[in-house]
Image (cartoon, helix red, strand yellow):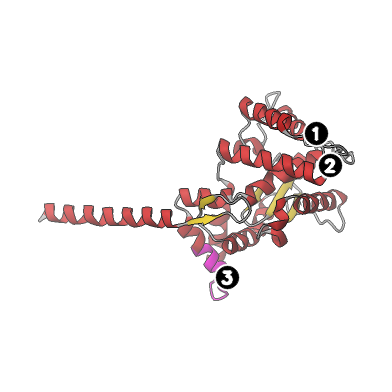
Amino acid sequence: MNRARGGGRLLIGLVVAAIAVFVYLSRTEVNPVTGEKQRVALSVEQEKVLGLEAAPQMAREMGGVLDPASDPAARLVDEVGARVVQGSNAARSPYAGNFDFHLLEDPQTINAFALPGGQIFITKGLFDRLATEAQLAGVLGHETGHVVHRHAAEHLAKGQLGAMLAQAVGVATDDGQGGGQRAAMLAAMVSQVVQLKYGRGDESESDRYGIDAMADTGYDPRAMLAVLEVLRQAGEGGQRPPEFLSSHPLPETRLKEIEEYLRQKPAVSGLSEGRRLR
């Protein structure tokens, strides 16, 4: 009898595993911008809902969002971000009208990140260390690349988090759910998304995207190297490494890859660093 029960549990386990593999493999979509076939946990519309619902809580956790109407730095982040989108193929993506660029009030944390669907953040701690518009465009272009390449949706599928996030999106769009339950679901959603660690391939894609977006927008893409130098210096002297580096690995090979990519790009006249930030 026990052997039969054990065999039954094994069979159920195998069936569940097979279903899980089938579901993962069936989540294949063609990226509307890059043409790449990707296995993703969320549809484009679910990504947008997820990002919009998670953004306010994310902002609260990092000091709040500065208002572009009254804060010149926040206004510049908004302007440069919009310029990067309009000058790149992000303008032809399904996220085009959903991109928002936010400056977070946190002056200590050195970070920038993108939520699925186009909500992009940079902390004041990082912004204050940038010297030019071009460097800001490099940071925002890199994060735009993560959105366009759907890296978060890919990693959520790989991590088998799609079911939890899909449920959270359902709660977010169902007004009949209790506020406490909804808040808890959103908290879990934010935590899972922000803690995602991108691999070297994702970072390389986003670096190249950011460089191309800078050039297409009129900014000198060599400023991307200056951004990485800012981050490196911020982590020296025994200080805690920038949060940006914890989720955006910075091996020496990545710097070399950027330098090589810049060498391969044809010379374009009229590119500039833009205005100095201070």
- Residue 141's tag is none
Identify the residue shown where x is 65% and y is 42%.
Answer: 206
Task: Judge whether 30 appears above or below 200 on screen.
Answer: below
Amino acid type, residue under disc 1 in the picture: Ala
Residue holding disc 1? 267
Q: Earlier in the sequence, mark 3 or mark 1?
A: 3
Does the magenta portion include 172? yes
Q: Earlier in the sequence, mark 2 or mark 1?
A: 2
Q: Residue furthest left?
A: 1
Q: Earlier in the sequence, mark 2 or mark 3?
A: 2
Q: Position of residue 37 (x, y in %)?
A: 52, 51
Identify the residue shown where x is 55% and y is 45%.
Answer: 196
Instruction: Quadrant for the N terminus, please.
Output: bottom left
Give me the C-alpha separation between circle 2 and circle 1.
20 Å
Residue holding disc 2? 133
Left/right of residue 246 with respect to residue 235 in the rendered view: left
